[in-house]
Amino acid sequence: MDIALIDWSRAQFALTAMYHWVFVPLTLGLGLLMCIYSTYYYKTGDEKWKSTTRFWQKIFGVNFAVGLATGLILEFEFGTNWSNYSYFVGDIFGAPLAIEGIVAFFIEATFFAVVFFGWDKVSKKFHLASTWIAVFGATLSAWWILVANAWMQYPVGMHFNPETARNEMVDFIAVAFSPVAVNKFLHTVLSSWVLGSAFVVGLSSWYLLRKKHVDFSIRSIKIAAIVGFAAILLTVLTGHYSGQKVATYQPMKLAAMEGLYNGSNKADLVGFGILKPDKLYDDGQDPFVFKIDVPIPGFLSFMSFNDFNSFVPGVQDIIDGYTLSDGTVHPSYKEKVLQGKAAQQALRDYRQALKANDEEAKETNMAVLDENMKYFGYGFFDSPKESIPPIALTFYTFHIMVLLGFYFIALFALVWYLNRKGTLGKVKWLLWLGVLSIPLAYVASQSGWIVAEVGRQPWSIQDVLPLSQSVSSIPVANVKTTFFIFLTLFTIFLIADIGIMINIIRKGPKAEAENNGY
Amino acid sequence: MVFLMFVQGGQSLIYRIGKTDDELKLMLDSLGKKWELTFTTLVTFGGAFFASFPLFYSTSFSGAFWVWILILFSFVIQAVSFHFIHKKGNLLGKNTYKAFLFINGLMGPILIGAAVSTFFFGAEFTINRGNIADMGNPIISQWNTAWHGLEALWGSTLPGGFHLWNVVLGLAIFFLVRSLGALYFINNIRNEEIVSRARKHVLINSIAFLIFFLPYLIRLLLKDGWTGQPDGTIVVEEYKYLKTILANWWMIVILLVGVVGVLYGFILGSFYKKSRKGIWFAGVGTVMVVLVVLLTAGFNGSAYYPSLTDPNSSLTIANSSSSLFTLRTMSVVSLFIPFVVAYISYVWKKMDFHI
């Protein structure tokens, strides 16, 4: 396949996904906070809570729009740019997307209208309920899209049908509630609450630094710091569980996250390090220029398999084949390639038999397919190199994400404590740090997705289909053109979005008296 | 979906009906409360196609690339425009967002109409499922012209492929949704100026709709269709769509009731100054007519996405739908739809969006 086509298709999807992920976590996070502020207003009747809610609702509304727009493109890009993928797994992958539309998007579209336009039209109770329902809808939509994503990382609940040449769903529950999906959902949504809280804390810190809207800012921080603190603790915990799933189902991704080439028992976790840029997987040189390990021996083993002594495989082990401490044997790259090629040959033979109406040959080939389908995708590779994800990008983004995770624990704890004491306004450096935390939260959140998706390379479906076989048959010039169209469009909208937010922030919460919708 | 595109129809009228800033604001406020429903339906429609007809999704979206990209582009600028147009600091200024809304109102219906018309007039593609295990040429769906969808605007690149019928349907849909948009304003906005202009536009656009739609309908009933055979091959059959409709009397009933509904809605909107109900008749009528047109495309063994380059690559419901298991799952999920309709009606009633 044309490498340029694959890379440009990748770039276009990454571009759309990353822009989408500027707006979505903010709306998920602000959504929850809006619900809580609104609940305070309902319970106390205090107009100050109302203006707090309405201010954050304005910010929410601006970002919701661009989130919708970028989301629309993402959904259709599977078809436009990844047609082979769409056919090969559409029987399974399409369902969560359709369900997302039917059960979640309509809830959002309907009830957000009440949230935006219903302040003086419906009762306080109905408005509050609508806010919660709308945010529930948004979160529910996250569930389904993450089910789809988790399935790419850990394909379950399907069976390959050689007659239609596609994977078909046989177990919906296995797809919708796979352990990877559950963890991914929790980790992603909780981290979005962190981002939303960091945004509120950051912006309120800005007001406190300028000594403006002090009551509003303290009020906003009061809730956001608690939500942020609880969410970041849970994000770290679910991150740990996600890591364990990666260790079990995507060992190559874990090896890349840790820059681990040669595995061992009692493997140590890298705290931070610099990788040698010219390292090849088989050149035997130490991968690190320098590194600092977490000073707990065997911590990576423990984090991966709950046992300080367990074996964690590195890139080389995965290529050579290895046995886990629990006795599970993982075949080598060569064996997987053999199985992949056997599956592909069986598919070709099956289709011949289908034409010739040869039932016996069909049955024989079906059995070969069933036995080897697990590694179907390896049949497309020529060299072990092709099975390794970009290690440096995965390694750095993973460590940046984790370090920022711990930073946010400290930040929210401190902000919460000082805000309670009533002295937050005096601690200038912390307020500045709060402001800086908005971009930092974005760095952490985007890094998380880079770990998940770059670490998944070269697969679109783990072990079953590489990206190189997933693309559409379109000229690379088409993809380049749409890439730049979308880049320009999204960038203009991002600047407009920020421009509008700056205007809302300048006006401040007190100007929020009139009801004019979004 | 076509009924819900009254939003796009309304957007395409913003220059003609909204003469002053206040009028424009009224129109956009009115549409602003409904556009998300249309948008959500489009997204769901995409997901449903993906889940139910993955082969259509993968073939059409990658093949007719530019048509779909332009449709998406027009909906992206719509979503942002509705939220940004009245905001300070919106970078591009009100007039640009207004133009964006107009562009969506123009391009959306015409291109979606043209795309739907290829269900009858076909497209140039081939499908080979065995390709997936072919190292050199692994892509299953191949498009056979470098125009990648733009050819739908004039027909096809094959000899004698120039016919413009796809655009005729596109324009029919465009004028239909403009009429529906105008009927919606009549129903939703309490402003005599706007309502009287809207009534004029119902008349003009409904006549334009009939000028394009009736010849298209006649052409459709007289044209050949592609039919799937029990052995999986596909052959061209004379008067295929006419035969389908004649073989299913209930389709004729729905079509006729639908047409009467649309016409009655137009007449109410154009001539009965007191009536605001035209949108309901025309809207329900539209749903019925579109239902029959879409059923005609796929019913009675017809290939709903005919391949002009290789008839055997044509997509029929039987050869391109999902597995039975997935379809059953989707049917169970569809049981949510009445519930969705119920809460939307409840909320809208409570909110009273009339302006």
Image: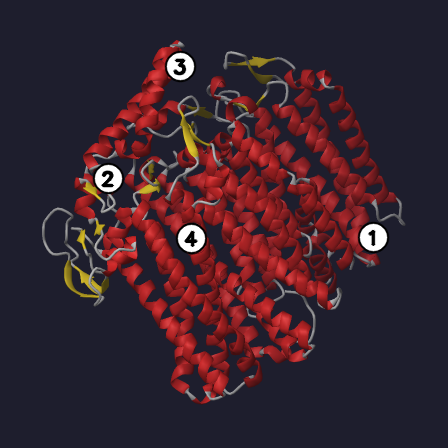
Within 10 Å of disc 4 (Cα), the crowding (few <14, some 14-19, many 20+) is many
State which quadrant residue A82 falls in.
top left
The alpha-carbon separation of the residues under discs 4 and 2 comes to 25 Å
Which amino acid does the dot numbered 2 rest on? His
Q: Residue furthest left?
A: A284
The alpha-carbon separation of the residues under discs 4 and 3 comes to 40 Å
Q: Which chain is indicated by disc 2? A: A
Question: Disc 2 marks which residue?
Answer: A330
Instruction: Tell me: A163 left or right of B254.
Output: left
User: Looking at the image, is mark 4 or mark 2 nearer the viewer?
Assistant: 2
* Vertical placement of residue A490 versus A482, above or below: below
Residue B64 location in percent, x, y?
49, 34
- State whether discs 4 and 1 lie on one chain: no
Mark 4 in CB contact with mark 1 (< 8 angstroms): no
Q: Which chain is indicated by disc 4? A: A
The alpha-carbon separation of the residues under discs 2 and 1 comes to 75 Å
Mark 1 in CB contact with mark 3 (< 8 angstroms): no
Residue A382 location in percent, x, y?
21, 34
User: Looking at the image, is mark 4 or mark 1 nearer the viewer?
Assistant: 4
Question: Disc 3 marks which residue?
Answer: A354
Q: Quadrant of the N terminus of chain B?
A: top right
